[in-house]
Image (spheres, grey):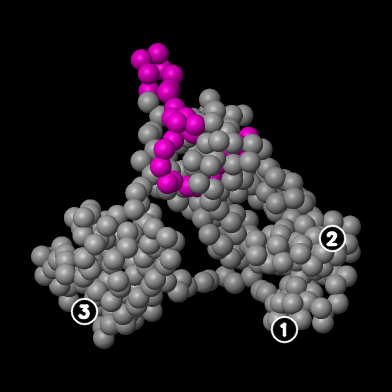
Amino acid sequence: MDAFFASVELLSYPELRGRPVVVGGRNTDAPTLLPDGSRRYASLGAYVGRGVVTTSTYEARALGVFSGMGLMRSAKLAPQAVLLPANFDAYRDHSRRFKVAVATIAPHIENRGIDEIFIDLSDIDEDSLTLAKRIKQAVFDATGLSCSIGITPNKLLSKICSDLDKPDGITILGMDDVQTRIWPLATKKVNGIGPKAYDKLCGLGINTIGELAQAAPEFLVQHFGTSTGEWLHRVAYGIDERPVVLESEPKSLSRESTFERDLHARNDRAELSEIFTGLCLRLSEDLKRKGYACKTIGIKLRYADFQSVTRDLTLPMPVIEGADIRKAAGDCLKRVPLTKRIRLLGVRASGLLLLGEAAPQNTQAQGDLFVDVFTGTVAPD
């Protein structure tokens, strides 16, 4: 899907089309409807806080604003951009709609997240361009949104090609086209080559996929290890044997919160306890909605100095209720030093079991939900 979250927002605010728009931030003000029927929007340049960019329109991306950037930094690049709060209920609804629309034409789908899928078209006897246009029209009819499609022999190349002609693009590529269409691209265009690997490749004089293809396999193994080195050699030639996986069970579910200011485990105990409990309750809701119980509960803390710690606890019986999650997460928290200010707090459920396969233990008394696990665990200032 093209700039998915931002595009969903533009359905509600069509007057913002063609303008730089950024979605994200904590406590971002929603647009205000004025007496004359127009709307007043929050400005990115006026944002103050630790929020990050959830997504941005292509006009904002042209100014250097991309997903994952801090909003304060983004404000320096595009102070005139409109800032909108995220509406995840709307995004989930449009995600469901676009996937249902695709399934009416090509049902062999691998779900890759809220805005992306792989489709196995092997059994559909139809011209690729005609098929791509039919899929795009079905998605537009269902959502009012555009998408970009890459049709190639495998998932690696399709992922790359889906980005080559955005927005609203169609790219069809065969193995014979790899040298002319793929090799000129930067190595970071390969899904799986992250910033660190990209920087290391550039440091070795390998900037493009074509240069990666010309590198000796032994050279890549020497610098990246056997597994990664051999993988880099294969992907440079467009080789990917992964099948489309029609069903995928999650390994874990998590909820976390980054605070507007660093919180102290004693001085901000009430606020931390409220946030901690809220994360556990929302994680419980996620489990119930997806039909899972869990055997292991974990926590994650990131301190003000960006050091992170995690703790896990495997339980004798699966749990699903917020009270049980809160108690187990509290037990984990007691094993963590709370002498430094905290920047982020998270709770994770793993060891997932379908509810039909698990008999969750009885919930703790509701009063246990709010036991202050921060009490008694803080060293003196």
Which quarter of the picture shows residue 287? bottom left
What is the distance, in whole Å, between disc 1 and disc 2 at their CAs? 23 Å
What is the distance, in whole Å, between disc 3 and disc 1 at their CAs? 45 Å
Q: Is residue 50 magenta?
A: yes
Disc 2 residue type (three-letter): Trp
Taking the spot 45% from the left edge, 74% from the top edge, the residue there is 251
Residue 254: % across, % down: 39, 65
Farthest residue, direction front: 381
> What is the crowding at mark 2: few (fewer than 14 residues within 10 Å), some, or many (at least 20)?
some
Secondary structure at badge 2 equals loop
Disc 1 residue type (three-letter): Thr
> What is the crowding at mark 1: few (fewer than 14 residues within 10 Å), some, or many (at least 20)?
some
Looking at marks 1 and 2 on the same chain, the residue that comes earlier in the sequence is marked by 2
Q: Which residues are magenta?
A: 33-61
Looking at marks 3 and 2 on the same chain, the residue that comes earlier in the sequence is marked by 2
Which quarter of the picture shows residue 289? bottom left
> What is the crowding at mark 3: few (fewer than 14 residues within 10 Å), some, or many (at least 20)?
some
Residue position marked by numbered label 2 in the rendering = 183
**Vertical placement of 371 versus 84: above or below?**
below
Q: Is residue 39 magenta?
A: yes
Residue 90: % across, % down: 43, 44
Q: Left or right: where does residue 11 sit relative to residue 32?
A: right
Residue 237: % across, % down: 82, 70
The disc at residue 226 is 1
Residue position marked by numbered label 3 in the rendering = 361
